Image: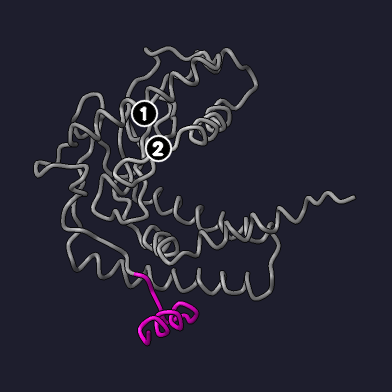
Amino acid sequence: MKNHRLRRHLLKSNLFVPAFVYNRHLDSTLWDANLQLRTIPSNSLQMIVWHYIAYMQNAGLAIRDEDIAEIFLHGSTSNYYYDATSDIDICIVMDTSRLAASMPGVDIFTVTTAMKIAWMRKHKIRIYGRGVDISIVDVQHPKYGPGVYKVGPAYSLPRDVWLRRPVRIDGKEIRILRRRARDIYRRYKRLFRECYKNKMSDTYLDTFLSRLWSERRAAYDRAPLQPITPETMAFRMMRRCGVLNKIKERLDKIRNKNFTLSV
């Protein structure tokens, strides 16, 4: 009971800093000892991705199977910093020229993202307790360099090979990163506390979340092949301590109040 009260006190104060998890091995539910993706999750993920592609095709989007250039797994579950909050991130590399030609003047990524949200609401997908997040990128526009569409390691699902293998950071470097991450986390936490203390509007909370995302993306731009940055750590620490969920709950509550129908 005393430990529970102490933890609650620390959570409310600025003394508690959630750990940034850095594992010695990849997630063994997904990867074998040779760092190959296990057969069942590999087949399951490919089935899920092609089901989403078929969903878009059946909805009338001009996408053919041959437009799909690559499908790869990336993110924390392909690296050593996965934790209980990690989703399995999948990227579809697609030739979008046919789709763009069929919808001139329309942002095709907004359309495909909206369809993904609708599809995921219909299908509750979990792989060994983890959610699955899917994104689409244009094969002609790698973001971080030739063939590099996402930061960090990448594992091809159809070819069952690493496009970029994960590399463990040594203990000394991780300790340096953790110290810097704690400073960023405390800054974020102070801003978060001000949000709640002053009952900030949904616009302010959206700006706060955008700042977290933009600082994280800027760090990726500086080190595209190594996603473990202080900003990445701080973001995940905010998620581990529940702050991001609290902000989303607060936003939902505020926005629900903005639309009231009464007799």
Magenta stretch in the rendered image: 1-18
Q: Amino acid at mark 2?
A: Ile
Q: Is residue 256 left or right of residue 164?
A: right
Q: Quadrant of the N terminus?
A: bottom left
Residue 251's x, y, as percent? 64, 57
Q: Amino acid at mark 1?
A: Ile
Residue at coordinates 53% horizontally, 35% vertically from top-left? 117
Secondary structure character of the magenta stretch overall: helix
| Residue 67 lies in the magenta-colored region | no
Residue 101's x, y, as percent? 56, 13
State the mark number for residue 29: none
Residue 179's x, y, as percent? 33, 73
Secondary element at image label 2 = loop
Disc 2 designates what residue? 125
Secondary element at image label 1 = helix
Q: Is residue 233 left or right of residue 8?
A: left
Disc 1 designates what residue? 48
Tell me where residue 162 sits by quadrant.
top left
Front of the two marks 2 and 1: 2
Residue most toward the right? 263
Residue at coordinates 34% horizontally, 42% vertically from top-left? 88
User: Which of these two is toward me, 158 or 234?
Assistant: 158
Residue at coordinates 29% horizontally, 30% vertically from top-left? 44
Residue at coordinates 44% horizontally, 60% vertically from top-left? 239
Q: Is residue 27 left or right of residue 90?
A: left
| Residue 5 lies in the magenta-colored region | yes
Q: Quick one: label 2 or label 1, which is nearer the N terminus?
A: 1
Tell me the crowding category of disc 2: few under 14, some 14 to 19, or many 20 or more residues within 10 angstroms, Cα based. Answer: some
User: Which of these two is toward me, 205 or 146?
Assistant: 205
Residue 71's x, y, as percent? 32, 28
- Residues at discs 2 and 1 in contact (Cβ within 8 Å): yes
